[in-house]
Image (tube, grey):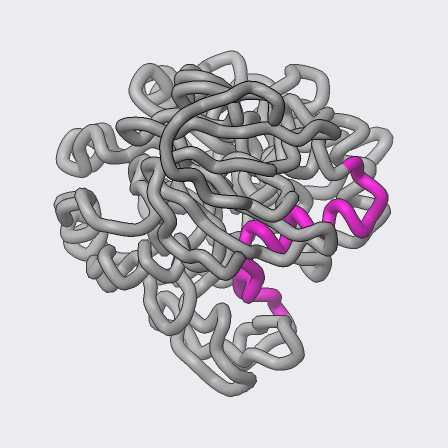
Amino acid sequence: MILRNVKLGTEYKTLVLEDGKIKEILNPCQEISGESIDAKGCIVIPGLIDVHTHGREGMDTMDADFSPLCDAYARAGTTSVLLTTMTLGIDDLLRVCHTPTNVAGAHILGIHLEGPYISKDKLGAQNPDFVRAPSLSDMEAFGDIVKMITVAPELEGMTDFIRRVSAKCVVSIGHTVADYDETIAAIEAGANCLTHTFNAMPPFLHRAPGPIGAGVEKRIYAQVIGDGFHVARGALVSAYRMFSAERMVLISDSIAPAGLPDGTYSSGGLAVNVKGGKIHLADTNTIAGSSSTLLDCVRTATSFGIPFEDAVRMATLTPAEMLRMDDHKGKVAVGYDADLLLLDDELNLKAVLIDGEFYTNNL
């Protein structure tokens, strides 16, 4: 495919896509034979990579029915995902981990286990009935599909667990009451990320810097929910300043009711209310995941004053680097996967390309 008249950065280019890759990036004056498609000056960015998302449009990772879910992600501009589980029973988690992932739509890069090795004192919207102690035998049974796991460092035996598991997947710190020293120990054992920074963890205080202070000091990655509700503007921009676009990862943390009308739904076996774009547990004011797409989060970060290029990086190249997939994902560059989004000047989604072919096209 030849895609003419795309805006890449500040310049207009022609993209040549072949065998699912970006084969060439040409200047408009360079001649090339073959039928081409006019992108009409749309901004081109890499397809978005969401490393923390439970579902959307009534579908949940825990349903273990990935085809319609990945279609929903792709239509919304998320072209690669770590499908994220809830803290539920081991049999349910095994079922998800052993479900085939070769489906159309968004590429499934792996599974993100959010729990079950978390703190009952920082559950958020997780189910307390299924919290358990860390288990290497569990991890062996889950298999290599697990590319990220969220854990609470303060749990007994967790330091050794992290040391063993971090060789195979990203260990992220979250749903925790760990203090600064416990977090430093976890990072030194191999943990390399914070799960939904600020949410479900101790705050960053001047005499008790906690996980956030430890994360900044050790230069690990930091997931931040960019829906504008979970993290206020000042905190989101502060996280960007502290961690930088090279270490901050925008996530949606979307759950099954995302994209559905206001009402009461179920998520992880718990009742949740959707109202005005916010999702809360039905019996408390606890925020229970988001209703945003990752592209919504990029737009929100941009509206908060973060440069568009950095907002895009935090949803593309930075998560690709964290997952060690940056040799083929996260850039509009020769040799990289031709998973691309075309946006108009108001950042409205006009087209999605996956493996060099149009998945949606509203040019």
Q: Does the magenta stretch include residue 287?
A: yes
Q: Residue at x 49, y 69 (%)?
A: 258
The N terminus, quarter of image: top left
Query: Would you say residue 47 is visible in this rendering?
Result: yes
Give the x, y percent position of residue 137: 17, 31
Give the x, y percent position of residue 340: 47, 39
Magenta stretch bounds = 286-307
Give the x, y percent position of residue 200: 60, 50
Is residue 58 found left or right of 238 in the rendered image?
left
Out of 234 and 35, give the one closest to the viewer. 35
Q: Residue at x 61, y 67 (%)?
A: 286
Query: Would you say residue 179 is visible in this rendering?
Result: no
Q: In this view, does 187 lie above or below 319?
A: above
Q: Residue at x 34, y 43 (%)?
A: 357
Is residue 239 found left or right of 353 in the rendered image?
right
Q: Residue at x 41, y 71 (%)?
A: 57
Give the x, y percent position of residue 60: 33, 63
